[in-house]
Image: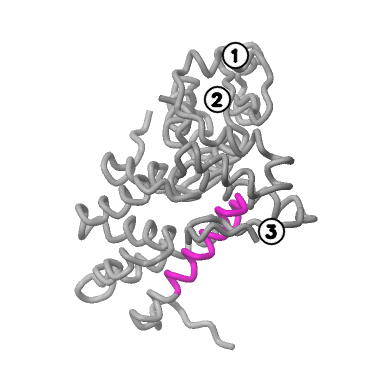
């Protein structure tokens, strides 16, 4: 089976991979396994960068994942859609915190801090 | 399977699972679910989950602790308690690697008592890549950082995991 490069994927295919990788992260968080989580993190980031590079900045399609049943998918979508839709993205993250959704609640707090305050300032 | 009709309730097998990896996953799922229940339903849930409550009852219940003040967390670290672990605010191994002294690392000022599952989750958090840290894990981002920065991040991790008020 030939694995397509990201640049050769349709937007729908990118979103399907985005979901699959987020579900991989969810599974990793259930078992506290950081290596598969981190591998998926880099691939998800790459997919988001590919969406951004497409004409018209296709990251807006991530909004469709804001009501996905899996909280890790919603969290990933919120992180990468935030530059275009900051208010709705923050609401998605806050809702995971408010619902005390295990195991994403703590991660959602870190994400919320990042979305509101940006990356950590250097010392 | 223990079932109450609540779709969010984790499915707990009636028989104890052989693999620790699976027992721990289910224990954490039960603990996470317990936190969402009012007290009277917590007792009912624990009564339904048999072997799991016998084996990990303290650990599951401690996960529902309300956040505490830092001084209280430090004071509680002086007495071992079932379902809790002593945790270093500044991670030990990276601090030793970067040349901090044993006196600082093992000082009572650097130790707190935290619910066991939250201890595991905080430890995993340190290893997970994170946009807040520029795509690095917190552990990687803290390489060669000052003690003050390590404490700052350590306390921030406690707040985000509901350990510190």
Q: Are marks 3 and 2 on the same chain?
A: yes
- Count of number-bearing discs: 3
Q: Evaluate if marks 1 and 3 touch, with contact meaning CB atoms under 8 Å apart.
A: no
Which residue is identified by label 1? B104
Please tell me if label 2 and label 1 are on a single chain. Answer: yes
Dot 2 lies on which element? loop
* Chain letter for the residue marked with disc 2 in the picture: B
Q: Is residue B44 positioned above or below A67 on the image?
A: above
What is the number of the mark on residue A91? Answer: none
Alpha carbon distance from label 2 to label 1: 9 Å
Question: Could you say which quadrant of the image residue B76 lies in?
Answer: top right
Please report the bounds of the magenta region as a residue range.
A17-36
Residue B76 to residue B1: above or below: above
Parent chain of label 1: B
3 or 2: mark nearer the eye: 3
Predominant secondary structure in magenta? helix
Identify the mark at residue B90; answer none if there is no mark.
2
């Amino acid at each position: 089976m030939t694995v397509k490069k990201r640049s050769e994927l349709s937007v729908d295919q990118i979103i399907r991979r985005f979901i699959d990788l987020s579900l991989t992260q969810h599974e990793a968080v259930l078992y506290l396994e950081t290596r598969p989580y981190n591998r998926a993190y880099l691939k998800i980031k790459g997919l988001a960068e590919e969406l951004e590079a497409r004409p018209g900045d296709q990251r807006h399609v991530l909004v469709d994942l804001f009501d996905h049943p899996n909280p890790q998918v919603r969290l990933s979508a919120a992180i990468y859609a935030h530059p275009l839709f900051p208010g709705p993205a923050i609401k998605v993250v806050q809702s995971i915190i408010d619902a005390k959704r295990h195991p994403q609640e703590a991660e959602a707090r870190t994400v919320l801090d990042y979305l509101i305050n940006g990356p950590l300032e250097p010392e | 399977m223990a079932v109450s009709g609540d779709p969010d309730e984790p499915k707990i097998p009636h028989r104890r699972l052989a693999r620790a990896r699976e027992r721990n996953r289910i224990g954490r799922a039960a603990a996470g679910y317990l936190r969402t229940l009012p007290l009277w339903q917590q007792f009912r849930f624990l009564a339904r989950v048999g072997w799991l409550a016998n084996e990990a009852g303290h650990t599951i219940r401690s996960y529902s602790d309300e956040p505490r003040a830092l001084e209280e967390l430090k004071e509680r670290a002086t007495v071992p308690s079932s379902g809790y672990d002593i945790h270093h605010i500044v991670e030990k191994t990276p601090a030793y690697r970067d040349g901090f002294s044993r006196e600082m690392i093992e000082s009572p000022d650097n130790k707190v008592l935290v619910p066991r599952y939250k201890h595991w989750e905080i430890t995993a958090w340190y290893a997970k890549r994170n946009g807040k840290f520029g795509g690095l894990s917190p552990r990687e981002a803290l390489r060669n950082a000052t003690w003050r920065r390590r404490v700052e991040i350590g306390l921030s991790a406690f707040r985000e995991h509901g350990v510190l008020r």
